[in-house]
Structures are given as C-alpha cells and as structure tokens.
Amino acid sequence: MKIDDYRLLTTLDETKTLRKAAEILYISQPAVTQRLKAIENAFGVDIFIRTKKQLITTTEGMMIIEHARDMLNRERLFLDKMQAHIGEVNGTISIGCSSLIGQTLLPVVLNLYTRQFPNVEIQVQVGSSEQIKANHRDYHVMIIRGNKMMNLSNTHLFNDEHYFIHPKNRNDEVEKMPFIEFQADPIYINQIKEWYGSQIGQDYHAMITVDQVATCKEMLLNGVGVTILPEIMMKHLDKEQFAFQRVDIDDKPLIRSTYLSYDPSMLQLPQVDSFINLIMEYVE
C-alpha cells in the first residue's frame, strides 16, 4: 500500500462519509470508492460497512486503520528526521495543548517562535488536557494541566493557585448568584465542590456549565455569576470591581500544575528542541 492509501483510510474513518473524504483529499468521490474497493480486496475483508448516512468501521477495519495511522506517523517521523540533517531550523512541529494554555501562554510563545524560526510550519490542536493526552501520538510536544503523562518526559512549567471571584457590589448576594463552572476533570471539580460547601455554607451546584474557561471568565466580567478561576486567567480583572478569595483545601492552596510533555526522541528534531528551549526560557 502507498502512503496515500493509508491517508485515505484514516480520512474515511474520521469523516465517516465518502463525500467528505473526497473533499478533504481533493479527489473525486468515484475515485475514493474505487480505491477503497481495491484496498479491501487486497486485505480480503470489508473495512467499512456502507449505510445511507455514514460509513461504519468493521472490527477488521479498526485493525487496518490503526496500522494505517501507525504508518502515517512513521512517515511523518521519517520526514522530520530528514529535516534534522538540514542546518536550518524548518520542517513541521505539531503541538497539542490544553484550551486554557491555548488562550493564554501559547499565543505569546508562538509569536516569539515564529519570529525566530519563520520557516517552521506549526500545527496546533487545542482541547481538554484529557483529549490531548488520549491523542498524544499525534503531537511532537504537548502542554497539559493536571497530572504528568506516563512514559514521557514531563517538564514542570508553573503552578496556578485558584481564587473564588465575585462582584464587590453584590457581596450580600454571593450565595444566591449562579455559580459558573468550566469543563475540567472530576477530581478537580470535586475539590472545588468541597471548598464551596465549606466556605459558602451551602451545597455546590453549578447553575451554568461551559466548555471553555475563557467563556467562564467572560460571563464573570458581564455579571452573570460567580466562579473559581486559575491564577493564569486573572489578568486584567479589576480589583476595584471584583473580590478575590484564595481557594484552600486542608489549609493549602488548591494548585493546578502545567507540564510540557514529549518523547525524549523528539529532541532530535531542531524545530521541537528550539520550541522547548524557547518556552522554558519564557516561563523562567
């Protein structure tokens, strides 16, 4: 099989339709259908079950697609290693990072990076730390929050304390104001629940739930409710307008750590090594 065949299979698995795959790969739908049949004949199994709405991956198909992804990753690593033998820092760097970091630290770092290394192509995937961890094989380097990643190198970047924030002009209404919760892992949310129950004097109940911490902050700024934010998100919050109370669990501040995670072999790639060095210099 050719690399293009592996790319076709993974694209079909992701899009679940022949039409969308054809659009992404810039080939005709009949060509996609013909090539898929040829691949299935070569393996002697059906990779997908065709329905009117979508493609459903078979058990054998899952095995083949996993192999296809592995081959694409090997191809990418090979090309990256080839670039490592060229003196100029270029090639591609793939970065996976938590949503919060994508809204705060990463844009600043990438501004510096692109100025120093303008020939590097940058691919960024932003999501929850759990999503980034689950797809860690897709990235050269990750910036995650919470726990370290097993079997990878984890460099500690910084810790965030947390603060309960509410409008000063509504001190008497804090208990009645809606609590705004952003998406996070269960252990983290349980710690917030524990603090809220002991300090506010009533059971925790998030009246508003959002998927991004930036949305949570915007709602706070617009007087929608109260919330708990990590320290990194507190820039530009007016201390004259808002009251801040540090969140302590068992007399210790609630801490959320941020890590730079990567396979040590990635340091062989100049574009990755230079990115890691730059971000480390910046946070110091």
Image (cartoon, rainbow, N blue to C red):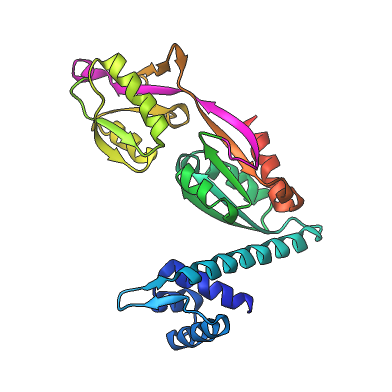
Is residue 45 found left or right of 53 in the rendered image?
Answer: right
Residue 196 located within the stretch drawn in magenta: no
Q: Position of residue 1 (x, y in %)?
A: 63, 79
Is residue 109 found left or right of 247 in the rendered image?
Answer: right
Q: Position of residue 159 (x, y in %)?
A: 54, 26
Is residue 154 found left or right of 131 in the rendered image?
Answer: right
**Residue positioned 72% across, 47% down in the render:** 273
- Image vertical order of residue 169 relative to residue 260, above or below: above
Is residue 225 found left or right of 188 in the rendered image?
Answer: left
* Residue 238 in sight from this viewpoint: no
The part of the image, by quadrant, that contains residue 173 is top left
- Image vertical order of residue 140 relative to residue 70, above or below: above
The part of the image, by quadrant, that contains residue 30 is bottom left
Q: Position of residue 175 (x, y in %)?
A: 21, 20
- Image vertical order of residue 174 relative to residue 235, above or below: above
**Residue positioned 22% across, 29% down in the render:** 178
Disc count in the image? Answer: 0
* Residue 99 in sight from this viewpoint: yes
Taking depth in this image into account, of 241 and 215 the one nearest to the observer is 215
Q: Position of residue 264 (x, y in %)?
A: 72, 45
Residue 157 located within the stretch drawn in magenta: yes
Magenta residues span: 148-174
Taking depth in this image into account, of 76 and 167 the one nearest to the observer is 76
Quarter occupied by the C terminus: top right
Task: Point out the residue furthest to the top here.
Answer: 251
